[in-house]
C-alpha cells in the first residue's frame, strides 16, 4: 500500500505536469502568422488586417489563403503584404492613410495607433506567407 505522503507527492507532480501542458497549449493558441507568439499590439493589428486588408491582399479564399511571393501578383487587388514589403515603412503608412487608385485611404477610418498595430502585425509576416487562419469575432 502507498503511504499518504507518497500519494500526496505523486498528486503534486501530476498537477505540475498538467499545469505545464496547459500553459504550453495556451501559448500554442496565441501563435501568430509566423508561428511566434503575437503581442497584444500585433494581435490587434492582425484583427485590423483581417477586417480591412484581407479582402484585397489575400488569395482566393479571403482571410484564409494567402498566395506566396513566388506565386505571382498577390491577392485579388493588391500585393501580398509581408515584412519584405516594409522596407520603406513611412511610405507604407502613407499608402494606408492616403490610399491609391485601387485602394481606399484609411486616414479617417484608422487612427495612428491602429496603423501602428497593423504595421506591428505585418512585421511578423514572413515572406512567403501561405496561410492566415481566421479568428471569428469573440474567439
Image (cartoon, rainbow, N blue to C red):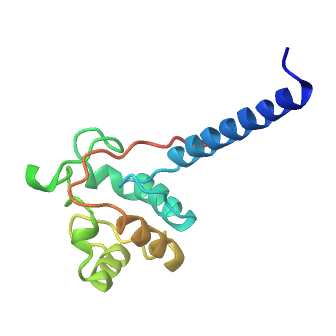
Q: Is residue 15 above or below residue 93?
A: above
Quadrant assignment, res 59: top left
Q: Is residue 93 above or below residue 19?
A: below
In the image: residue 21, left or right of residue 117: right
- Expressed as whole percent of the image width and height from the top left, the position of residue 84 reads 22, 70
Q: Is residue 14 above or below residue 79?
A: above
* Quadrant where the N terminus is found in the figure: top right
Q: Residue furthest right?
A: 4
Residue name at image x 45 percent, y 58 percent: 46
- Expressed as whole percent of the image width and height from the top left, the position of residue 21 reads 60, 39
| Residue nearer the viewer, 70 or 114 | 70
- Can residue 30 be seen from the camera position used here? yes
* Quadrant where the C terminus is found in the figure: top right
Quadrant assignment, res 133: top left
Residue name at image x 59 percent, y 44 percent: 26
Q: Residue furthest top?
A: 1
| Residue nearer the viewer, 51 or 65 | 65
In the image: residue 64, left or right of residue 1: left
Q: Is residue 108 above or below residue 134?
A: below
Residue name at image x 25 percent, y 52 percent: 129
In the image: residue 62, left or right of residue 128: right
- Can residue 72 be seen from the camera position used here? no
| Residue nearer the viewer, 93 or 108 | 93
- Expressed as whole percent of the image width and height from the top left, the position of residue 33 reads 38, 53
Residue name at image x 33 percent, y 66 percent: 104
In the image: residue 50, left or right of residue 55: right
Amino acid at each position: 500500500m502507498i503511504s499518504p505522503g507518497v500519494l500526496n507527492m505523486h498528486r503534486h507532480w501530476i498537477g505540475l505536469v498538467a499545469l505545464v501542458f496547459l500553459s504550453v497549449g495556451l501559448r500554442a493558441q496565441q501563435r501568430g502568422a509566423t508561428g511566434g507568439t503575437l503581442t497584444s499590439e500585433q494581435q490587434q493589428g492582425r484583427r485590423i488586417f483581417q477586417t480591412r486588408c484581407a479582402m484585397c491582399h489575400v488569395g482566393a479564399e479571403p482571410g484564409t489563403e494567402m498566395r506566396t511571393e513566388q506565386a505571382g501578383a498577390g491577392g485579388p487587388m493588391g500585393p501580398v503584404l509581408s515584412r519584405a514589403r516594409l522596407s520603406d515603412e513611412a511610405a507604407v503608412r502613407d499608402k494606408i492613410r492616403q490610399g491609391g487608385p485601387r485602394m481606399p485611404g484609411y486616414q479617417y477610418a484608422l487612427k495612428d495607433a491602429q496603423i501602428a498595430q497593423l504595421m506591428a502585425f505585418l512585421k511578423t509576416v514572413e515572406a512567403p506567407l501561405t496561410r492566415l487562419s481566421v479568428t471569428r469575432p469573440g474567439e
